[in-house]
Amino acid sequence: MRLFIAAALFLVVISCASKEEKEEKMRTVSDQIRVSFDTVLVDSGDEFLYLHDQLRNSDLSSDKNFLFNFNLRDLTIEKIDLNQLKLEEIIKYEKEGPNGLGASFPSFKVLSDQNLLFWTYRFYKIFGQNGLLNRDLELDKIASEYFAGNEYYAASLFVGESNPNRVLELIYHRESGKNFILDFDLASQTFKKIDLPELDKNLDYKVELFSGGRSAGGYGGAVISFQINDKIIFSTNTFNEVQVFDLTTDSLYLKKWDTPLLGYRRAYLPPKSVEQSSGEFSEIVRKSDEDISFMSLVWDEKNERYFRFSQKRQFAEEQTDYGRYIPTGADVFLSVFDENLDLLAESQIPELTQPPNIHFAKDGNIWMFENVNDELAFVIMKIEDL
């Protein structure tokens, strides 16, 4: 099935002025994004793939030839060949013992050497695809002051592409709501803290929740991060910008956009606190989701460009038994950036009427996870003539 979409013309004003001339120049963003869709199924043989978490606990190999899907129920990794579209093998991991993943459910990622890094509270270990432990990073011992209690949360972990002894951890401070990096040197067993001040703006969208007058956590303002080669890119779902940390230069810089289609930031600002069981909280969730939400960038290595979806949810007036408004659809937008994060094109994609599931770029196309009758499938969106 081939669907073609014509978009309107958008202009982005980019200041290219030198210090002396102070001139402003206009850059025209491509006036259309033409796409086509196809759906492919993965052959799992006699196995039933773990789709309960909708691939939220999955990762790609660095060459994007394989998808690794973590089955949290039985601690197995389903290794899926994306070129052949079939299940290659199921890797079994242990819960206890010297090769155990422990009692909690760890996050994981596939490293460039094809080993797997698992982490959770005070647990940072690299395993092979044979299920055996290769290395205990012991980050909790190197920076023990950040792991003595539950004040700090390890949101994500990154390993330097050119220096595997360099490990960076995105830390969330529960009390302040702020995020920062712990930059580890495993060779010297040292670390340094790197602040991410631009992410503090996201606190404008944080709502403190109460249950019966007691603190019950928070809502709103998600921080998103991903690594491409020796760059770590941080973003939020509320601001049309990214903060980039370059591991080769140890530099931190900001890239922001204010476009006619998406603007610069979410307009709706929620109250600072709310009772979780109240109808007011349901209204906050609805108003937040009806406003713009920016998703993660994904890297298209074939064409050296980034894709990013954004969305505005739509809701019925009816509510669930839990008092939440029932979603009925969404306006979905696609932004395309070059390798320097300059905007190339931006358009609504009318044929996408629901927020895209877990997705990634491969072979120049966008692959979006789809559950088709409990079978693993991907909707492949091809960007044409951009």
Image (cartoon, rainbow, N blue to C red):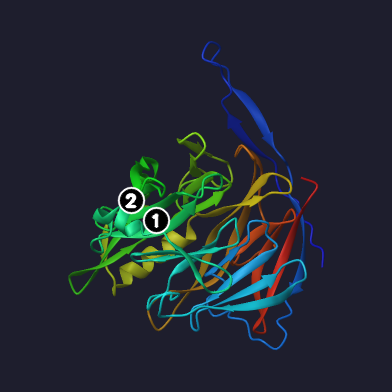
Distance Cα–Cα, label 1 vs label 2: 7 Å
Q: Residue at x 70, y 46 (%)?
A: 8
Question: Amino acid type of disc 1?
Answer: Gly
> Outermost residue, top direction?
20
Q: Give the quadrant of residue 221.
A: bottom left
Residue placed most toward the observer, 348 or 199? 199
Q: Position of residue 222 (x, y in %)?
A: 42, 57
Q: In the rendered view of the protein, which quadrant contains the N terminus?
A: bottom right
Q: Residue under label 1, please give it.
A: 221
124 horizontally vs 310: left or right: left
Q: Position of residue 117 (x, y in %)?
A: 49, 63
The answer to whether the residue labelled 1 contacts the one labelled 2, judged by CB atoms less than 8 Å apart, is yes
Question: Amino acid type of disc 2?
Answer: Leu
Whether residue 346 is situated above or below residue 19 in the rendered picture: below
Q: Position of residue 285 (x, y in %)?
A: 40, 65
191 horizontally vs 316: left or right: left
Q: Residue at x 50, y 84 (%)?
A: 74
218 horizontally vs 167: left or right: left
Q: In the rendered view of the protein, which quadrant contains the C terminus?
A: top right
Whether residue 18 is situated above or below residue 204 in the rendered picture: above
Disc number placed over residue 203 in the picture, else none: 2
Residue 289 visible somewhere in the drawing: yes
Sequence order check: which comes first, mark 1 or mark 2? 2
Q: Position of residue 302 (x, y in %)?
A: 73, 49
Disc number placed over residue 192 in the picture, else none: none
Residue placed most toward the observer, 217 or 71? 71
